[in-house]
Amino acid sequence: MPVTSDKKNEQRDLFRGALEMMILQSLRRQPMHGYALVQHIRQRSNDLLQVEEGSLYPALQRLLKEELVKAEWEMSATNRRVRTYKITPRGVKHLEHEVSSFERMLAGINLVLSSAKA
Amino acid sequence: MNWLGQLISRRRMEADLSEEIRQHLEEKVEALLAEGMSRDDAERTARRDFGNVVLLEERGREVWSWPTMESLWADFRFALRQFRKSPGFTVTAVLILALGIGVNSAIFSLVHRVLLQPLPFPHPERLYAVWARSDAQGNSHIAASGPDFLDYSDQNRAFSHIAEFIPSFTFTWTGEGEPKLVNCTAVSEGFFSMLGIHPYLGRLYESREYTYLENDTILISYRFWKNQLGSDPHVVGRVIHFEGDTQTIVGVVPPMPDLFPETDVWPKLTVRPSWGFMKWRSNKFLTVIGRVKPDVTAQIAEEDLTGILHRAPGEPPDVRVRLVPLKDDVVGSVHTQLQVIMAAVALVLLVACVNVAALLLARSVKRSAEMALRVSLGAARRRLMQQLIVEGLVLTAVACSFGVLAGWFSLRFVRYLPAWQLPRMEGIHLDTAALLASAAVAIATTLFFAWVPSLTFSNLDLTSALRTGRMGTGRFHRRFFSWLVMAEIACAVVLSVGAGLLLHSLWRVQHVDPGFQPESMLTVYLRTNYYTPEGRSFWRDVLDGVSALPGVRSAALADCTPGKGAATATLVFDDRANDPNHAPPAQGCWASKDFFRTSGTPLIQGRLFTDNDDANAPPVVIVNAETAHRYWPGENPIGKRIGVNYTGPGRTGNSTPRLREVVGVVAGIKHGALDSPTEPAIYMPYLQDETNHDMATMSLFVRSTADPRTLASSVRARIHTVRPDQPVEDLRTMQDLMGQSLAPRRYSLLLLGSFAVLAVLLAALGIYGVVSYTTLQRTREFGVRVALGASRYSLMSDVIRKGLVLTIAGAAVGAGGAMLATRTLSRLLFQVSPLDAVSFTSAAFLLAFTSIGACLPAAWRASHVDPVRALRNE
């Protein structure tokens, strides 16, 4: 659902945290509204990750609820009324923690995969 | 944030979310338009890339709400609406489940109370009943005599307490209105303390009161105090007359529903000194119970007492003491009966669950269009599953509440079945654990089968489901259904076979020749308390008076009762060596002259008693055919001489008996249950009892010319003219009395039979459901066949054949199961093999006809398919 690199729905749990991580990372660089976030993630991943655009919003609601981001209605550069999300200090801390544990996991997986190849 | 604040801010959050999604879509459309797409295409692409707006909004909202609570509430209301919309399904499912739960918990409560619940005494596991067994005598329930008990009590090392009692005898209670018989249980010192019983009022007996015979204190039971003495608060010290003696009530014994529910009075059983009949070694009529010491096993205690018994003079070497846990001793023979009923009722619950499962599956098929629509609108699988489970829960909750009611009624029904005397029935109540266990099974089934259909949602062929209103999973369901129905039929067959076996046994028992004619026969048990020859005139006057009544063909006295019981005796022969250790046993009876004429028992050889066979005449005896056959095979028994050691209560059995001449042989009377073999029996003129013990209690038998019940009042009046204060209770017809001995059989059959009927009905419902469902699925096929000229008959037989195949498969499995299961029934059967062909074939035919009946509606519908409409629907 939120991010699908594969058709198999079973993998969604693994990626739910990933989407939130990517959102927080993007917002850490600069505050953005939803549409911009989608575009940003897509470009950054060189279109490797096909984001179903709408799935961003439930994720954003979750982050809002846990006060990892906050939102405000603003006028955009294109003179459109948009709801801009900013990362909170708590969000930064959460992001760092998540990223480091994700990297550890990735390193672990890599080790296993490379030893399997050898 | 507190929950109230959250509730208010939630509205704003939801509004914000909708607004921002709308903005997102607009921005995307604009971007696409800028790339040169047409507006229509741009809008379509934007929506496609975004995903399901409704679903995503809901998911977003869920973050803020208590999604479970709220959706549960919605599902609950939806479930109620659904059930209102399909009352047929709802009522059927609730009824089936409620019956299953109710009947099960009632029977389980019964089993729990009677078989499982420990006796309500401290450390009940250390309480044992003490019996002796002798394989040579074929008796495993030999009671103890007074000297036996004294030996046990003085010499044992294994018991902390040991006591004896006479479980049941009667006193005549006079001085307050009509003379009445009261039930007595006489207990020795230590009985109450062994069971940890404290007086309800007053005190129990003191030690010194057990040390002399002529004391006048008495204990009464709670029941007697309440029912007969009107709960008199000043009962302690009240004077009461039993057996013509004046006694002072010193205390009230609390209710003991597990051991002595019927006892009115608790006389003391004095051991030292004691009455004459307590001193005779072979007068074995006392029940002994003991509490073993904490560190002693039953086996060691058995050895201990067996050793003591073997040291007693004249005790045959093969006799061994047998300790029976007191609870098992109380429960006795109903054990098997109850286990069978319990197994049967569990099968009923199984069938009920299977049926509800089938109902739920059929319903899920019917609702596939609704489900397909909801899936296509973006309903999540989890969400649909939750809703189905809530529906299942609502259904079972309703069913459980009706189940409690059904259980309560079933229990009352079982409890008040007249004459079904189960031990420990007092204080029975609907067991919470039983109720919870049955409900848990029902709930688990319902939830499981509410949930199963949701498994098929993920690979739904939505288009076809929406178009045809059915899910593309017919095959899966059909197969599942078939399995369920086969399981049901198998259970129904097992139960039907069981009921058939019991029915066949009952029929066999009822057609046993009892050796007497119970029709037009009246009997009453009379207790006079004469132990001397002065009783003779009373009995003679009663006999003469009753015989002279109009409508009386003949009347007789005897201390045995056909169909109910006789005392035991052992025989001594003058024509062979007698081994006192292996004295041949026989049933014994003192009878008056016309006993056999009154009972309608045919004389086979010799003569019946005459007026000349009185106290002064040479002693004579009449034997039954079994006695003649066993002890004088191939010889003429007439003129043989035997001595009879009468071992019934109150007999010495010590003196050498007088030799009696055999003067006649009669057909065998069943003195025990009809389903037990006819034992050797001997009959002696009651005037020739030199101990005069038979004067104390005898039964009067009256053969009438018309309906015996019309004689009851004149017989009663006649006895009262002889002796006004003679209690005349329990005046009844012999047919009544025999019916009572068949009661346990009847009630086992009644219960098992009704479970079988229930199971067959449920199975029929199952077959009906499956066949209707598969027929509906094949509507198009039938349409085509009708269009191609198939006859209605061939379509009907096709449908019925499908049903019969299921039935035969199920019945084969059931028959296999029954072959294994009925072995446990064998103890309840009489002259019927557990593999009785009659029962098995009737069960098979019953199920076959039922299933044809259940297929007929569907078959009729199939044969009347309108080809045009059937084909147009697709």
Image (tube, coloured by chain):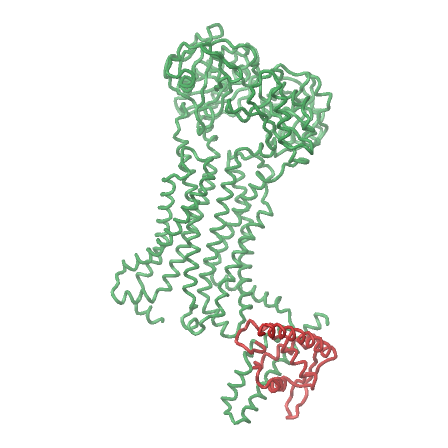
Chain colours: A red, B green
Q: Residue furthest right?
A: A89
Q: As displayed, is residue B48 above or below residue B266?
A: below
Q: Nearer the viewer, residue B792 or B537?
A: B792
Q: Which residue reaches farthest left?
A: B789
Q: Quadrant of the C terminus of chain B?
A: bottom left
In-image side of A3 versus B605 (left or right): right
The answer to which image quadrant residue B8 occupies is: bottom right
Tell me, yes or no, if residue B62 can be seen here: yes
Q: Is B388 located above or below residue B572 in the figure? A: below
User: Residue B3, position in %: x, y?
Assistant: 70, 70
Viewer can see residue B553: no
Please give the count of numbered marks on the rendered protein: 0
Q: Is residue B655 above or below residue B142?
A: above
Q: Quarter of the image holding residue B464?
A: bottom left
Q: Is residue B544 left or right of residue B404?
A: left
Q: Name the residue nearer the viewer: B689 or B138.
A: B138
Query: Could you tell me which quadrant the N terminus of chain B lies in?
Result: bottom right
Vertical order, A102 against B131 (above or below):
below
Rendering coords of residue A51 (x, y %):
58, 81
Q: Position of residue B206 (x, y in %)?
A: 73, 24
Q: Position of residue B671 (x, y in %)?
A: 46, 23
